[in-house]
Amino acid sequence: MIWENQQDCFGDADLKDAVQSLGRYARDFFLPVGRDRVNMFLKLDHCLRVFREAGAIAASEGLTGEMGRTAVWAALFHDIGRFPQYARYATFDDRKSVNHGRLGVRVLKQRGFLRFLDQELQKIVLAAVILHNCRFLPPGLPDRFAVPTKVVRDADKLDIFAVMLAHLRPDAAVNHVVTLGLCDNPAACSPEIVSQIMRGCLADYTKMVWLNDFRLLLCSWIYDLNFTTSRKMVLERGYVEKLLAPLPDTPDIRLAAKKVRADLRALAAA
Ligand SMILES: [Fe+2]
């Protein structure tokens, strides 16, 4: 567990307390044994890693002051709704349960986790939590809300790349909670997902049928990253190459792979 070893809170003593508070809150939902406990641990570790990724993005993009501070607070708490969600519904699939962003905002308000921040900063953090899992951000969102939200969205994706790669390895143990119950057919990809990639679009979760669709959907996230720092991280860590490797060698997939590789190189250099 990396949770107990968390030391660096970007010089923010209140944030250090907040890290501990989140850990205590999450653990209250842990079941004693089994797969459910593993899934809860995964989510708690994810929260901390996203928090760290957000700190790295904010630092690299020169986001100092309130912008950087709200980004890391929001990153830490972005998935707090996952714990009551999983405890009640035994799934992380919002379509089968509740919107975990909205649930997270309710928890943050009820438990007073943001009490160390002034009212304006609390509003920004709550907005980032509620917006972190929207497909698209509302147009015209002011920068003081949009920028921290975008940091959280990128940081979340960076960690999910790593988590999903571990679960999508051909030899990985099946965890239907993480892979959303998708069918494993090594030869199958849905044409609609491939076509979304060919159009340079973010692929649609609701169109996924196969595990390969999930690999392609994750590749399409390169079109939804907000910062050059995040795109460079994806390129340097080889996430897209690792996602593409198990896909079937068909003309359609070869074309899609070529496009994603070229687009990522261009986006990371922008
Ligand atoms: Fe997340």
Image (spheres, rainbow, N blue to C red):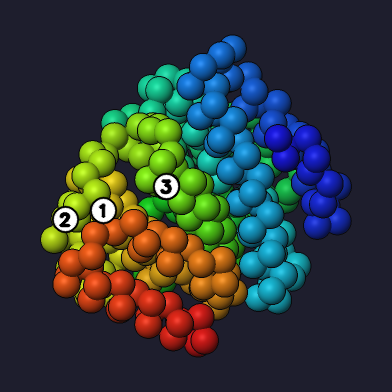
Query: Quick one: label 2 or label 1, which is nearer the N terminus?
Result: 2
Q: Label 3 is placed on what type of residue?
A: Arg
Residue 105's x, y, as percent? 52, 39
Query: Quick one: label 3 or label 1, which is nearer the N terminus?
Result: 3
The response on whether ligand 1 sits within 8 Å of label 2 is: no
Packing grade of label 1 (10 A; few <14, some 14-19, many >=20) is many
Packing grade of label 3 (10 A; few <14, some 14-19, many >=20) is some
Q: Nearer the viewer, residue 111 or 253?
A: 253
Instruction: Give the side of residue 202 with respect to residue 26, left or right.
Output: left
Q: Nearer the viewer, residue 13 or 212?
A: 212
Residue that carries the numbered disc 2 in the rendered image: 190
- Which residue occupies 52% across, 52% down? 162
Residue that carries the numbered disc 3 in the rendered image: 169
Q: Quadrant of residue 240?
A: bottom left
Cβ–Cβ below 8 Å for labels 3 and 1? no
Give the vertical position of 40 relative to 141 (above or below): above
